[in-house]
Image (tube, helix red, strand yellow):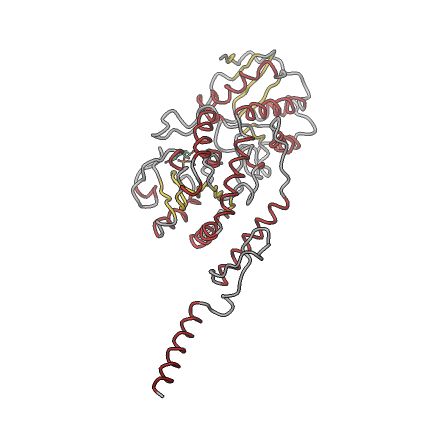
Amino acid sequence: MINIQLFFLVFLKVYILLITLYPSGASEEFCTKPDGKCDEEKINKYSKENNAEFQKFLQAIREAKEQYIPCKESKCSCHANVITNDLKTFGDGITKKLLDSVNSKGTKYQIIDHHLYREQSCMFPARCAGVEHFLLELLPKLPDTEFILNPRDWPQIHKNYGLFGPVFSFSKTSQYNDILYPAWAFWEGGPAISLYPRGIGRWDQHRNILGTLGNTTKWEDKIAKAFFRGSRTSSERDPLVLLSREKPDLVDAQYTKNQAWKSDADTLHAPPAKEVSFEEHCKYKYLFNFRGVAASFRFKHMFLCKSVVFHVGNEWIEFFYPALKPWVHYVPVDSNATKEQLEKLLDFIKEHDDVAKKIAEDGYNMIWNNLKMKDVSCYWKKLLKRYTKLLTYKPVLDKSLIEIKK
Ligand code: UDP
């Protein structure tokens, strides 16, 4: 009799334990494969809630892959649509009067008879030099033209207010009519940090170093943690930094100082972290990119680590962003994502290592194959040729400009 009672007691305890661990339905088998073929995979380790969330991510990946049409990887064709879209606004032609009306929005350049001319002063000389590197190289192939180049971070031609006219800017959102040009930082004039005191530039050199590292570091040897280092140029970075403080095994995200730093308040009430080189970033599987004042220059570097890039927010773009597709080349993250949402996304990607590895590889290939220095030059050439066709007049040399030589 005692034995029967003992048996029922043990049975009851085991039953209670089981329903606590696996609430109703959670022990069902769920499909976790991006192609939806689950016959060979029987995973039941997630809670029902997690699994529903994970299925949403997998569905988004499936849809992104179905809709993805690879671009033609020659003559910077992957980025050509950006030029078409930016110039559409000026389809009726660019008159001299229209160009002159936006003179104050940037630095005036002219190309006349294969010589380059610029206004005497440029607000950011290193930025102008970074742009001129490409223009000088292309001079023999460029038509006579003139344009206004905005060397500031912020675009100038808002769609709903202010001036209207053709202004070249390196970054913008869909709210602006600025014409995108490849940033100066591909050559020089990028942000200076202690590790890169002359500014992050020379994309050709970073490309080779990081591209090789990305190819030689095994995925399995990377640390399965999210990583971010940078200053607090936008508060959209805060949730990841706060998550890192709570869950250092999941995320290492810390704020560094920039020139505007005055106290720990500027690094979200913690002492500034030491800066970390791009090469060091490559040790981690998951790398975060955020906008700063405008688009951040780190985006392209992160891909070459062959790690998964988590791209937060999709508003701010440079000319090569539209060729990169969410869930194909990177993991998209809402710019308002909370700590909890970031954690869930990271849990998902950690649980789906094969999915993560594929996104990392596809992101790497897209940048490696389509963002060579040759592609940057090609974009400049295509942009200036198409833009010049819209000028309704033949530019004549403005004597107030100075000639820029190599
Ligand atoms: N950066 C870096 N290591 C660091 C901090 C920053 O390589 O420890 C790079 C970063 O990737 C970016 C640039 O320095 O390209 C400026 O970063 P920051 O976060 O200060 O500003 P952002 O331009 O991203 O708004």
In the picture as drawn, the residue positioned furthest to the right comes out as 92
Numbered circles on residues, count: 0
Q: Quadrant of residue 278?
A: top left
What residue lies at 58% left-to-right and 39% top-to-bottom?
Answer: 174
Q: Quadrant of the N terminus?
A: bottom left
Q: Classify residue 139 by image quadrant.
A: top right
Asked whether residue 294 appears in the rendered view, the answer is no
**Residue at the image position 49 percent from the left and 59 percent from the top:** 50
User: Residue 130 location in percent, x, y?
Assistant: 48, 22
- Write the residue at 59% across / 49% down: 62
Image quarter for ligand 1 equals top left
Question: Toward the viewer: 399 or 42?
Answer: 42
Which of the two residues, 10 or 230, is positioned nearer the viewer here? Answer: 10
**Residue 22 visible, this orientation:** yes
Left/right of residue 268 with respect to residue 353 in the rendered view: left
Note whether 103 is above or below 86 in the view shown: above
In the foreground, 317 or 36: 36
Nearer to me, 70 or 255:
70
**Image spot of residue 168 (x, y percent):** 56, 27
Residue 276 placement, left or right of 178: left
Q: Would you place residue 207 above or below residue 360 in this image? A: above
- Across and down, in percent, residue 178 comes to 57, 32
Q: Residue furthest bottom?
A: 1
